[in-house]
Amino acid sequence: MLRKVTQLAAVAVRCSVFTFFAACALAQTAENALLKRDETQLNFSNTDGVLAGETPAAAPARAAAGKPQASSRERGQVGLGIRVSTLGPGAEVATSLAPKLNLRGGFNFFSYNRGFDKDGVAYKGQLHLRSGELHLDWYPFAHGFHLSPGLLVYNGNGATANASVPANGTFTLGGTDYLSDPKNPITGKGKLDFVKVAPTFLFGFGNLVPRSRHFSVNFDLGVVFQGSARTTLNLSGNACHPDGTNCVNAATDPTVQSRVQSEQGKVNNTLSPFKYYPVVSLGFGYKF
């Protein structure tokens, strides 16, 4: 599973970079063609820009009236949407800044509870997918395809867990076996998180602020560059030799704490592919 996630993230990054440079080149070609067309339309038979049968005083008014007004009307329009993604279900809002540029923000929220046992330690865990996004959507061809650099302005993705080992239960830390003291059993808390602000890059199809209709379908692919996982495990209670002797405080004993550090390192290494978290999103929107 982790190998598949890693491969998906790598493909997303390569596709994003390739598409970005290809789109920029095509956009420049299209822009040059539009400029040549506009210059051709402005070449009147009269060098002063006065059309046949038109008075000189009317030319400036006609030129002003001929300037595109749609761009100003498009600015400030707002669209709202809902979506489901690998960051969790959420909602988003966008506003148009220019004919080919939108500012889009949203949030995602999802929680999942699950209990599991590992190396003799019982965990009651909760997965959190909580994040806030901000993206600049650029439409290089004035259609649905967009490139969207952005940020997770809040990255609350991670997990928490309560840990316990029953009295006289055996458990393993860093390859070493221990016994949970019957007089003071082992308990603890675990936490997994990532950096709170992370850059993102998305590309896809759809426009939350479409120019000629109200409803829209939006699809995004991309990646969150959130760095390595950060795992902490805090234990309390007494850990004893498997025969029940030599009990020590798990929170302060240097040997036990070194084993805890080893366990944290294992978890971080297992989650290393998620430093490039893949994003797949499908949403539906409405422009007001």
Image: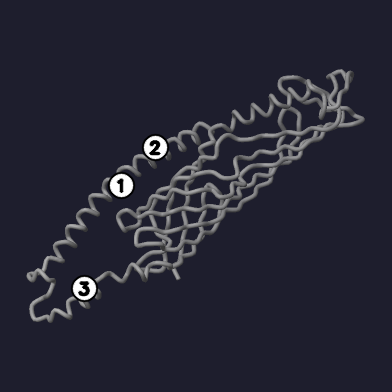
Q: Describe the element under mark 1 as helix, strand or loop.
A: helix
Q: In whole angstroms, how far apart are the C-alphas of marks 1 and 3? A: 31 Å
Vertical side of 88 occupied by 188: above or below: above
Instruction: Identify the image quadrant of residue 46.
Output: bottom left
Q: In whole angstroms, how far apart are the C-alphas of marks 1 and 2? A: 16 Å
Instruction: Identify the image quadrant of residue 159.
Output: top right
Q: Which mark is residue 24?
A: 1
Q: Quadrant of the C terminus?
A: bottom left
- The residue indicated by pointer 3 is 63
Vertical side of 211 occupied by 260: above or below: above
Callout in the foreground (1, 3): 3
Vertical side of 78 occupied by 183: above or below: above
Which residue type carries mark 2? Arg
Horizontal relation, residue 182 to residue 254: left or right: right
- The residue indicated by pointer 2 is 14
Sequence-wise, which precedes: disc 1 or disc 3?
A: 1
Q: In whole angstroms, how far apart are the C-alphas of marks 2 and 3? A: 46 Å
Asked if residue 1 can be seen in this view, the reply is no
Q: Residue at x 35, y 57 (%)?
A: 144
For the residue pair 5 and 144, the one nearer the viewer reads as 144
Which residue type carries mark 1? Cys
Q: Describe the element under mark 2 as helix, strand or loop.
A: helix
Sequence-wise, which precedes: disc 2 or disc 3?
A: 2
